[in-house]
Image (cartoon, grey):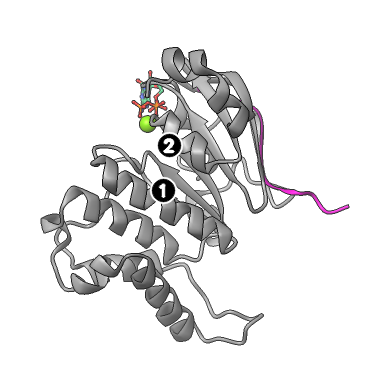
Amino acid sequence: MMNNNILEVNNLSVSYGNIVALRNVSIKVPRGKIIAVLGANGGGKTTLLKKISGLIDAVGGEVIYEGNEITKLPAEKITKQGIIQSPEGRQIFGDLSVEENLKIGAFTITKDKEKHQSRKTVLKNNLERVYKYFPVLKERKSQIAKTLSGGEQQMLAISRALMGTPKLLILDEPSLGLAPLIVRDIFSIVKELNKEGTTVLIIEQNALQTLKISDYAYVLQVGEVIMEGNSKELLQDQQLVESYLGK
Ligand SMILES: Nc1ncnc2c1ncn2[C@@H]1O[C@H](COP(=O)(O)OP(=O)(O)OP(=O)(O)O)[C@@H](O)[C@H]1O
Ligand SMILES: [Mg+2]
């Protein structure tokens, strides 16, 4: 039977020297869903993403993608297989233009054998798709990226990830430092992307908004999953939303 989960993390542990950043963490990301990982600062959220993307080593446990173990694969191989992340703190190339940044995001794409499209066509289609979602980036495609506003830079970071045609899009705190209206825009675009077929793993501290757009959520605290459940049900848990997650 085909496995319904695009990604499974099983009993993952990660340490930085003596500091245990993740302890026996297990999460499942079913194909086609939006899965959230919530929790306060230092909980281990970014560490989890870095491990999934192959940027750090694990002490124990495994990461399974599309049914294959990828725990020890290098980052480039993982990206090529379609796990693409928009990292914390955006990390765009400040001295390059918007469109140059987007083209860098497309470096892993190849021709689409199923649709019989050349690499050039795939690139053009991805660029059109990104500009459809974020028209402001089209207007500003020649602008030097570091002069974009914070919200625009976040849009660029997400768009750059989209340029690589992710099967699993990973977002690390897309709402960080943004005004509520822009957060709402970005979250509704994430929802739309998901409706068009992209599976999303989203890391956030903005629990309320994230629970509204996600299907299932995990709460990480000091390296451990302390709670998980359907997002709708977690939203009903006033105490959880207030005391563990802030607003
Ligand atoms: N390279 C590193 N060396 C040593 N300790 C690290 C390193 N990276 C992270 N840590 C520690 O691991 C713990 C988890 O950090 P991580 O960045 O995963 O948390 P986070 O949940 O993403 O937090 P935030 O919400 O602040 O981004 C923290 O205590 C952090 O100080
Ligand atoms: Mg983090």
124 or 181: nearer the viewer: 181
Residue 70 shows in the view: yes
Identify the residue under disc 2: 209
Task: Write down which quadrant ligand 1 falls in.
Answer: top left
Question: Residue 82 placed where, x, y %?
Answer: 55, 59
- At label 1, the amino acid type is Phe
Q: Is residue 45 left or right of residue 218?
A: left
- Whether the magenta-drawn stretch holds residue 5 is answered as yes
Q: Does the CB distance between marks 2 and 1 fall below 8 Å?
A: yes
Q: Earlier in the sequence, mark 2 or mark 1?
A: 1
Question: Residue 28 placed where, x, y %?
Answer: 67, 37
- At label 2, the amino acid type is Gln
Q: Is residue 168 left or right of residue 39?
A: right
Question: Residue 221 placed where, x, y %?
Answer: 48, 17
Considering the image in quadrants, where does the C terminus appear? top left
Q: Is mark 1 within 8 Å of ligand 1?
A: no
Give neighbour class at mark 1: few <14, some 14-19, many 20+ (Cα, 10 Å). some
Range covered by the magenta-colored residues = 1-14
Q: What's the magenta bit mostly, secondary-structure-wise?
A: strand
Residue 244 sits above or below residue 217 on the image? above
Residue 25 shows in the view: no
Residue 20 sits above or below residue 69 on the image? above
133 or 67: nearer the viewer: 133
Identify the residue under disc 1: 187
Residue 142 sits above or below residue 223 on the image? below
Residue 116 sits above or below residue 238 on the image? below
Give neighbour class at mark 2: few <14, some 14-19, many 20+ (Cα, 10 Å). some
- Whether the magenta-drawn stretch holds residue 40 is answered as no
- Residue at image position (38%, 66%) is 133
